[in-house]
Image (cartoon, rainbow, N blue to C red):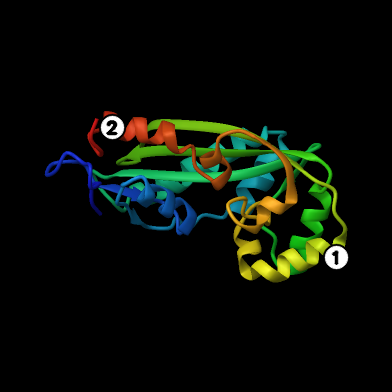
Amino acid sequence: MGTTTLGPGAGAPPLVLASASRTRRGMLANAGVLVECDAADIDEGAVKDEMRARGAPVAEIAGMLARLKAERVSLRHPGAIVVGADSMIECEGRHFDKPADAARAVAQLMALAGRTHRLYSAAVAMRDGKAIWDATDVALLTMRGFDSGFAQRYVATIGDAALGSVGAYQLEGLGAQLFERVEGDFFTILGLPLLPLLGFLRGQGVIAR
């Protein structure tokens, strides 16, 4: 745990990210925020299935997952600010999760090819099991049309990275070749509403104003 290189020094509340995501940790580190990572162990599939069954919007599901992650980890870190986050994709009424294998990653890319999808990223901050902040943002991404051969080559090139992303792509890398238009905040697409989070952390004294 720690504060940023631009932080206020001793006395700042510790910050914990309830995630094992290298991308989210990297975003915070690149912004000068040092954070401890402690991944939450929750049954995301069961939560999604239950909420989808009752017709919950995608943004609400992402927010609930972020909340549950933060809540679980917050109980292990008394006094710390714990941030949970989650991202989900919706395209023409269909929800997409992280693909389980390369074949499913290719199938997912083909389902998104030539279409516009919405990517929701939610974050919730808790202290001692109580929510003290939350934010959800959405980006619109339009994939160009491509054939299955291109999708297969892309997945083979990036390897396991395709399985670690809810969209089976990383826009910051070769994934840029999949798209013809992107509308929204870059950090949101990477999986975290970073700028609102930084504003909250400044207000809490975790980073300097």
Query: Judging from the image, what secondary structure is the residue with disc 1 in?
Result: helix
**Residue 82 shows in this picture:** yes
Q: Quadrant of the N terminus?
A: bottom left
Sequence-first disc among 1 and 2: 1
User: Residue beneath label 2, please?
Assistant: 202
| Near-viewer residue (124 or 180) | 180
Badge number at residue 149: 1
Q: In the current view of this chain or complex, which residue is farthest to the right?
A: 147
Q: Is 165 drawn above or below residue 49 in the view shown? A: below
Nearest to viewer (mark 1 / mark 2): 1
Secondary structure under tag 2 reads helix
Q: Quadrant of the C terminus?
A: top left
Which residue is drawn at the image coordinates 41% and 51% (left, top)? 18
Q: Nearer the viewer, residue 201 or 27?
A: 27
x, y percent for residue 205: 22, 34
Spatial separation of the CA atoms under disc 1 and disc 2: 47 Å
Could you tell whether 121 is left or right of 141 in the image?
left
Is disc 1 surrounded by few (<14), some (14 to 19) or many (20+) residues within 10 Å? few
Q: Is residue 60 above or below residue 81?
A: above
> What's under tag 1, amino acid-wise?
Gly
Q: Name the mark on residue 78.
A: none
Residue 90 picture location, percent across and down? 72, 40
Residue 64 visible in the snapshot: no
Q: Position of residue 200 (x, y in %)?
A: 34, 31
Q: How many marks?
A: 2
Q: Is residue 130 above or below residue 43?
A: above
Q: Is residue 165 above or below residue 126?
A: below
Residue type (three-letter) at the residue carrying disc 2: Arg
Q: Quadrant of residue 164?
A: bottom right
Q: Left or right: where does residue 30 sit relative to residue 141?
A: left
Residue at image x 65%, y 67%?
A: 158
